[in-house]
Amino acid sequence: MTEDTITISSGAPQADIDPGVYEATLIEISEPRTILPQTGPNAGKEVSLRDWTFALEDGTEIRGSASTASGPKSKTYAWLTALLGGTPPVIGQSYPRSQLIGRECLVTVAIDEGGWAKIVNLSARPKARAPEPVASPQPPRRAAARPVAPVAAGVADDLPF
């Protein structure tokens, strides 16, 4: 008979993403899940959360949670604003996941007290700027130089330079 054992591993590295701002693409929004926080302002109250998964440019994934609350002061509202290019969501409008997946934004990552990467902010990507006009290769035309005042012949110039 073999003995069942539990082998302790070293675990995953806590901070696999350096703090900073990254370009990211939303790749998944989970179904709501309910938690019962033990601490904080919602301690003892059921809270519904969705997990939002973003892929960074190098393919690294980072996940953040936001409550299902969607009012103007909620994290979900702020995140939708970022995903909608900086335009706030319309009150009363529904946004299917299929219209959000694949949208890009900037993700600000910090490392929490436990050493784990955490999404602390989402912001809209800057809009593309119009290309600068190409400078013409011709030098600017200058008017021919003309004296400001005529100098009388034989008059001494008393200027010190």
Image: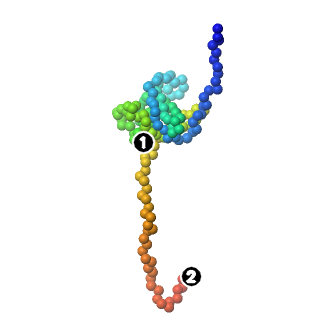
Residue type, numbered disc 2: Pro
Distance, label 1 to label 2, CA atoms, is 62 Å
Evaluate whether residue 118 shows in this view: yes
Which label number is shown at residue 13?
A: none
- Does 150 appear above or below 138? below
Q: Residues within 10 Å of mark 2 (few under 14, many from 20)?
A: few
Residue 61 x/y as whole percent: 52, 33
Q: Is residue 12 left or right of residue 94?
A: right
- Does 146 appear above or below 115? below
**Frontmost residue, 153 versus 96:** 96
Which label number is shown at residue 86?
A: 1
Q: Is residue 134 left or right of residue 9?
A: left
Residue at the image position 48 percent from the left and 29 percent from the top: 51
Residue 53 x/y as whole percent: 48, 32
Evaluate whether residue 113 shows in this view: no
Say which element carries label 2. loop
Which label number is shown at residue 160?
A: 2
Residue at the image position 59 percent from the left and 34 percent from the top: 15
Residue 22 x/y as whole percent: 52, 40
**Frontmost residue, 90 versus 63:** 63
Among the two numbered marks 1 and 2 on one chain, the one whose residue lies closer to the N terminus: 1
Residue at the image position 53 percent from the left and 35 percent from the top: 60
Q: Is residue 69 left or right of residue 157?
A: left
Labels 1, 2: front one: 1
Quarter of the image with the C terminus in it? bottom right
Residue at the image position 50 percent from the left and 91 percent from the top: 154
- Residue, far top: 1
Q: Residues within 10 Å of mark 1 (few under 14, many from 20)?
A: some
Quarter of the image with the N terminus in it? top right
**Frontmost residue, 150 versus 138:** 138
